[in-house]
Amino acid sequence: MAKFYLTTPLYYVNAAPHLGHAYSTIVADTIRRYKNLQGLDAFLLTGTDEHGQKVERSAKLAGMSPQEFADQVAELFRKEWQDLGLEFDSFIRTTDAKHEVAVKKIFEAVWKAGYIFKGSYTGQYCTACEQYANEAKPGEPCPECGGPTETITEENYFFKLSAFQDRLLNYYEEHPEFIRPETRRNEVIAFVRSGLRDLSISRTTLKWGIPLPSLPGSSSEASQEKHVFYVWFDALTGYLSGIGYGQDESGEEPFRRLWPADLQIVGKEIIRFHAVYWPAFLMAAGLPIPHTLFAHGWLLFEEDKMSKSRGNVVSPGPVREVLGIDALRYFLLREIPFGQDGNFSFDALVSRYNSDLANDFGNLASRVLTMIGRYFNSEIPYPSVMAQRSAQDRHILELAENVISRYTAALDNYEFSGGLEAVWELIAAVNKYLVDTEPWALAEKNTGEDRSKLATVLYTSAEALRIATQLLSPIMPESTARIWTQLGQTTELSSLPLKSIKESPLATQEKIGKIEPVFPRLEKEATVRKLVQLQQQVSGRGLPKKTAAGVGAETALAIAKIAIEDFLKVELRVGEVRVAERVKGASKLLRLEVDIGTETRQIVAGIAESYAPETLIGRKVVIVANLQPRKLRGIESNGMIVAASVGKEDRPVLVTFIEDVPNGAKLR
Ligand code: ME8
């Protein structure tokens, strides 16, 4: 059986998993299921990236050792995937002993091939991105993420990336399927064409990493000089170590069978590491290059990338609890064309659930099954012979055939949204067919002819429902399995190959199962409210607790002692609100203009649920004046209003002064 090896990124353990991570992993799980149904032997690797400064710092804040911290967060990821019903074949942690063996092995291969040299480097380093910000000057922020950079000088081992410029460009040219989608491919090509600098792949400025081995044939003893691997050299190798690279003979078997990867799924912000560094490392080590890298877009929340550092993450837990896993899978795959950015909102999620799942698909299943129960004693009826069927009857089956081809073509090309659209065309057509043919009226008339028409309508609808259910099984495994049972099917849906869709029509006179609603309609406002409430409860509870004192990393961040110089970096000033108005389409946000003496600042604040805009005019407030500007709902916010966070629901209460204070006064 041909294999299909696919991977997700290996997630950093500095943050608990959120919907952005879940998105990549859900897509990967869907592809794994789909490829298995196509008769391939799919193998999915996921895991965690545990070394580097980011993790070292988070652990410190939580008052733990990096290993202890990583152990707990890696477990959060594993548990989240389990709770979401995501199936993977290997979970690699970059702190696993076998991973260290693999990193050393690939490094030695690259070294032997002559692509490693020692040099010194001074530059701005961005800890958030874990990379040098070559374009930034001292004191300047990182051009990628806007975060602070630090000046670092290191004696490092370098990888001769520059030697690979032409080979990479040739490779991209000869393998147009290597980088997808096309926009990312063009970006990468432009980047490589602009020239590649050699890459420092070791660090002496941190301890939390895999030590470099002593280099064969070299006078320098890298390990003694306390070099650890640059986290990306280490992490990318996880795609190999997770399938046995570097193990002894039998341990390395999966690697020999599975490598090169057929598909590597990544977010668009890490395409450069995967499309430039990674193939260059592999070429240098004499290993084959993966077939396709697919860089998907970002899940946005309130129009900003959902990410821990921006503090706008949504956890999968509440959605899972309130709407179920399949609703989340469906929403993400349908709403966002794969490759593009897409907005996530509870409102859109519940709307789609109600319209597509409850009204369209769920309703179709319950209507068809209920009528078979009522009119045919729960047995799939015999349809008329083909010649006696109406054009309407025939149209449904023809459409179903057409949808099968469109759906598979779309999924083969990772166009989940398009594939789902095709299935929904079929679902909508069958719902309309039921309205047009009025089976309930045929049942009432109950003449011989009506009875056979009724049997044909219900058989045709049930057959279309079967096809839709089978097609949707990789997308919504749990709910389609339930509908499958209700259709009276006893074979396990997840084990039925895709080709059986055309080959095995619904057998007549089989008993259907017990009918139960699979997607009950939800009251929108109450559901959204519940989701928001649950999200607020889990926010800040994601990360591990310090064993004894029970302090979470986020709390630790809040209570960790900082030096006075750190505090002095924060510029707090008194301001007076001149203008306050609601932000269209955002129930929580107000747009304020605040006079801080020397200037008037525009600030977007999440206080609309506690303060009516008109009550704020003329009010003194405290603002953080030296925050980097950030856009909320497309409006630039230049600062932050300081408020106490009160009660379970974190109600904001503004800071006030009893005495009069001039605008612009600094707080110390
Ligand atoms: O970059 N929308 O790890 P990471 C969509 N350790 N996808 C998102 C997302 C969002 N808002 N936020 C995160 C790293 N992701 C490295 C990878 S690989 C050898 C090393 C997903 O924890 C997306 O797949 O920052 C993104 O690329 C990945 O999580 C980044 O996870």
Image: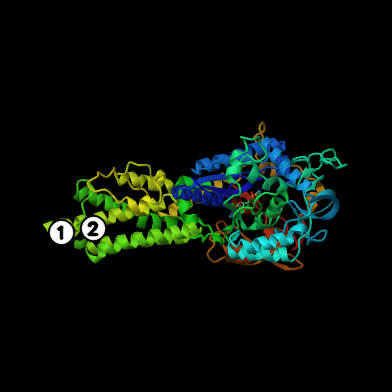
Q: Amino acid at mark 1?
A: Asp
Residue 258, percent from left and from top? 58, 45
* Labels in figure, total: 2
- x 22%, y 60%: residue: 386
Q: Amino acid at mark 2?
A: Val
Pointer 2 residue Cβ closer than 8 Å to ligand 1: no
Residue 475, percent from left and from top? 45, 51
Indicate left or right for 459 with 35 as reference.
Answer: left
Label 1 vs 2, first from the N-terminus: 1
Q: Which residue carries the number 1 mark?
A: 450
Q: Nearer the viewer, residue 533 or 491?
A: 491
Q: Which residue carries the number 2 mark?
A: 457
Q: How is the image coloured?
A: rainbow
- Confirm whether residue 572 shows in the render: no
Answer few, some or many: residues within 10 Å of disc 1's Cα (few below 14, many 20 plus, some between 14 and 19): some
Residue 299, percent from left and from top? 57, 57
Answer few, some or many: residues within 10 Å of disc 2's Cα (few below 14, many 20 plus, some between 14 and 19): many
Q: Nearer the viewer, residue 329 or 413?
A: 413
Q: Residue furthest right?
A: 219
Q: Nearer the viewer, residue 439 or 634?
A: 439
User: Is disc 1 in contact with disc 2, using a CB cutoff of under 8 Å?
Assistant: no
Q: Residue furthest left?
A: 447
- Confirm whether residue 134 shows in the render: yes
Disc 2 element: helix
Residue 186, percent from left and from top? 64, 66
